[in-house]
């Protein structure tokens, strides 16, 4: 998560320094994709668990579902929003499939999700030890 937040904060400066102001229009697109890509990376462990419990079929069905969401949203959003619409469509498909996969794993299969304790734990202790 810190890398995602750092990327969102630093992308403006990085794009302008590396590519110049003519590429400034990509900044909001990259920010959208950083959020969805970061979430997908966090829940990627779910795919490994699903492979481990022999549910490759669910991964395939979920991927087909994500493609359908992406295509439908592309058709709806790109005409009016252009590249930003494509980024929102892609991000939405990734986020919906990540949530659906995690839900299936944790609720339906009653599998302990390896990252939930890390996500739910505060990053810093609320009080000093001792």
Image: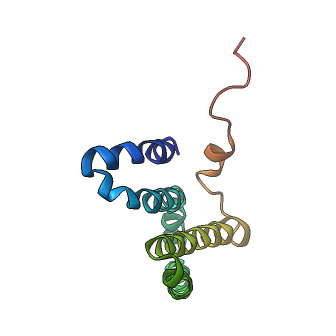
The C terminus lies in which quarter of the figure? Answer: top right
Where is residue 7 shown, x and y percent of the image? 44, 46
Instruction: Quadrant for residue 65, please give it.
Output: bottom right
Q: Is residue 21 left or right of residue 122?
A: left
Locate residue 100 relative to residue 71 in the image: left or right. Answer: right
Q: Position of residue 27 (x, y in %)?
A: 42, 56
Residue 55: % across, % down? 54, 78
Q: Is residue 60 visible to the viewer in this orientation of the structure?
A: no
Residue at x 48%, y 56% (from the top left corner): 31
In the rendered image of this protein, does residue 89 appear above or below residue 25?
Answer: below
- Viewer-side residue, 89 vs 26: 26
* Place of residue 49 in the rendered image (x, y in percent of width and height, measured from the top left): 53, 65
The colour scheme of the drawn protein is rainbow
When the figure is inspected, residue 125 is found, relative to residue 76, above or below; the finding is above
**Does residue 32 sit above or below 80 in this rendering?**
above
- Circle count: 0
Q: Hey, which residue is sitting farthest front in the picture?
A: 22
Q: Residue at x 62, y 57 (%)?
A: 113
Q: Above or below — where is 70 with respect to 43?
A: below
Q: Residue at x 48, y 70 (%)?
A: 84
- Asked if one can make out residue 5 in the rendered structure from this viewpoint, the answer is yes
**In the orientation shown, which residue stands out farthest toward the top?**
130
* Residue located 64% across and 67% down the image: 99
């Amino acid at each position: 998560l810190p890398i995602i937040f750092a990327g969102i904060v630093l992308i403006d400066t990085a794009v302008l320094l590396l590519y110049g102001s003519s590429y400034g229009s990509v900044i909001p697109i990259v920010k959208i994709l950083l959020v969805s890509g970061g979430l997908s990376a966090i829940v990627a462990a779910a795919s490994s668990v699903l492979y481990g419990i022999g549910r490759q079929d669910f991964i395939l069905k979920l991927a087909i579902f994500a493609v359908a969401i992406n295509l439908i949203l592309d058709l709806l959003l790109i005409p009016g929003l252009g590249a930003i619409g494509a980024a929102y469509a892609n991000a939405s498909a990734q986020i919906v499939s990540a949530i659906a996969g995690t839900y299936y794993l944790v609720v339906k299969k009653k599998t302990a999700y390896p990252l939930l304790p890390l996500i739910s734990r505060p990053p810093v202790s609320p009080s000093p030890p001792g």
